[in-house]
Image (spheres, helix red, strand yellow):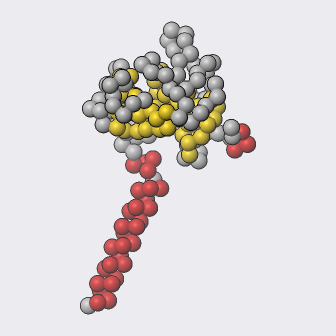
Amino acid sequence: MNGKKVLLGIVTLTMVLLGIFFCCINKEYLSESIMISEVCSKNQRVIYDKTGDYVDYIELFNPTKHTIDISGYMISDKETNEFAQIIEDSCIESGEYKIIYIYNFGISDNETIKLSDRSGNEIDRIKVPILAADSVYALDFSGKKWRVMPATPARENVIQKDSEI
């Protein structure tokens, strides 16, 4: 009887540990929402908005298998969404990127940027380090790490191993 209990305990513990392992390792595949993938706080010549101005921007990425309507989502540099920039009518297709130009606030060095859904629930956040002009803080999908790198607006962020900034 004790042998069965020990075996059951080992099997249960193994299943729990495997669940935690796969949850952590495959987080990107389990994501059910939009994520911040690139932040440019000193956009001087990277990409311009529809009026021809170079404006700070945030790139969003949809890692899910379906289109997500981000209308009403908010981007803020504050804990509250009081002065948040509200995203206008927009959708992001599966596997696609979307540039959001920031007009309601300037992105500063060492500032935390927060993405919230239309109900105000936080979806993602990132602390922006000190950046040089036209460089970005981006999620390097090849290494799955945040890095300072050359801008890649609306494209996958992959840095060459020999060109790290």
Say left or right for 40 vs 76.
right
Residue 45 location (% of width, % of height): 63, 18
**Could you tell me which quadrant the N terminus lies in?**
bottom left
User: Where does the image place residue 116, in percent across and percent down from the top left?
Assistant: 35, 33
Q: Where does the C terminus fall, quadrant-wise?
A: top right
Coordinates of residue 141 in the picture (x, y in percent)? 55, 43
- In the picture, residue 129 is in which quadrant? top right
Q: List the single residue furthest toward the top.
A: 51
Q: Position of residue 13 (x, y in %)?
A: 36, 73
Q: Residue at x 55, y 26 (%)?
A: 41
Residue drawn 64% across and 25% down?
A: 133
Above or below residue 163? Residue 74 is: above
Q: From the viewer's perspective, is residue 27 above or below residue 15?
A: above
Does residue 90 appear in this view? no
Residue under the image location 64 percent in, 28 percent down = 132
Residue located farthest toward the right when viewing the structure as drawn: 162
Say which of 33 and 44 sits in front.
44
Is residue 93 placed above or below 5 in the rendered structure? above
Q: Quadrant of residue 152?
A: top right
